[in-house]
Amino acid sequence: MKSRSNLEWVLSQGRFALTGELGPPQSASADVIRKKAEHYKGCVDAVNITDNQTAIVRMSSIASAAILVGLGLDPIMQMTCRDRNRIAMQSDILGAYALGVNNILCLTGDHQSFGNHPTSKNVYDLDSVQLIHMVRTMRDEKRFLSGDELKAEPRMFIGAAENPFADPFEYRVVRLAKKVAAGADFIQTQAVFDVARFSRWMGMVRDRGLHERVRILAGVIPVKSARALEYMKNEVPGMSVPDELIRRMEKADDPKEEGVRIAVETIEQLREAPGVAGIHLMPMMWEAIAPVVAERAGLLPRPAPPAAQEAWHASEGPSTGA
Amino acid sequence: MIVAERKSLDEILAMLQGCSRVLVAGCGTCVTVCMAGGEKEVGVLASLLRLAARRDGRTVEVGEATVERQCEWEFVDRLAPVIGGYDAVLSMGCGAGVQTIAQRFGGARVLPAVNTKFIGIPEKQGMWVEMCLGCGDCILDRTGGICPVARCSKSLLNGPCGGSQGGKCEVSQDITCAWQLIYDRLAALGRLDLLEKEFAPKDWSKNRDGGPRRVTREAIML
């Protein structure tokens, strides 16, 4: 094991993994995090904490992740390259690990023009591939990016994102290979509505043998309405939403129920694809639906870490582990 | 070339408050080519300043002078005989031009009439586009002659990000994804292998690093 991550443990057991996503509040309220986290207890193996997603200021992913550690959940701290240079990023990675965070998801980050501070200056000192490489260097070679020695290394389970629906399509798998070579242990994909295109992409992933070198979790968003689907199709960059899905939601008597059904069917289809190691649920501020989808997709109960693992957690707690 | 764009008349008038003798100084190089601050634009701005003064019931004396290059001493020197008679010099040169005049004529109040935008080219008549950021460490040999530092919204070296769709950038449909261009060009050149290898983090010390950057070539020093 490279880390004390529960997600890594689940994947190492060959179990089909399930992660969820939690968006921190646009406030200083820890209670909002605690309330949302309740939905994920016993329902997922790890919980992504977004990092100022869509460039809207929210509670930091580090602080939110630390709150989850306190609740006994395994957070995946998302980190974008938009807001911090290499000095701040390394510093935050050390701090997050010291607070008990064992997973990091390395992202480029949405452009600041989408958010509520469009006149800000972006950073992008590193890009996501370089960030992955930096975390791997810190963990495995015990060195900073500068080459300086790092005495207590942050033993992070390293994640990256990939979007099979972005262009150039043939290049997406090459970029995935770059992320794997840089040190990604797991991948969480953009939300899959277009299963056909995802399957074509997975075929290219298998052709390169990448599914054996990295664990791929396919993204799924349970939607509440046809309008939400249309919004994603038209307004969210890098999304592919088939028209027949929108029509299906439009015709539904109970759109929320239909949204859950679509999510469950999508999970079942994705599970069939060789090389898909798990699902990443992104309920988009509808965290309460996560346990429902997990239950109906037959993904509960989640594997419990063995006693030995738990004992190790207890004895090598975050404060002494680093 | 350096591409610039004239500031609004209101902003220029606000800067000139209290000035009754103004020298509008043009530059005959980049800003002439991009039609922002050459002799012709100097004439237009000078006329606008006189009209505004008449409208507001003020008297103002506006002089006009365009030199070959505002960023070279020998050309800026030619302003010496006239500059003393003015309250302010309104430079229509780029930021380098404004500062060269200010440095050469210690007592002069030198004001910028244009916003210096970027190093670029005319994409078509009346439209200029950025091509180079002057980052100090050119990588165009590895990117098919297309610069991601200047032309990708996030300056990614291992792009494109997940927001590239249909050849467009996630920021706007008006922005071409630089990494799509790089991909297409390297594909045409049979050099997609260049995109398989990770680009290491950029050495930004060659861009912004402790004050203004200098180029020194001793062989040609006097």
Image (spheres, coloured by chain):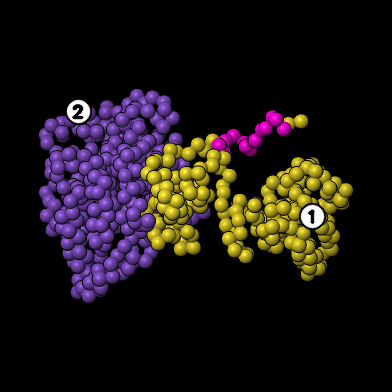
Chain colours: A purple, B yellow
Closer to us: A230 or B136: B136
Identity of the residue drawn at 82% across and 45% down: B77
| Label 1 neighbour load within 10 Å: few <14, some 14-19, many 20+ | many
Amino acid type of the residue that numbered disc 1 sits on in the rendered structure: Thr
> Which corner quadrant holds the C terminus of chain B?
top right
Q: Position of residue B95 (x, y in %)?
A: 68, 48
Identity of the residue drawn at 33% across and 28% down: A141
Question: Badge 1 is on which residue?
Answer: B66
Identity of the residue drawn at 27% across and 27% down: A320
Please give the chain letter of the residue carrying mark 1.
B
Amino acid type of the residue that numbered disc 2 sits on in the rendered structure: Ser
Q: Can residue A41 be seen by looking at this rendering?
A: no
- Which residues, given as a range, are shown in magenta? B206-220
In terms of secondary structure, where does tag 2 sit?
helix
Question: Is residue B130 a member of the stretch shown in magenta?
Answer: no
Which label was assigned to residue A315?
A: 2
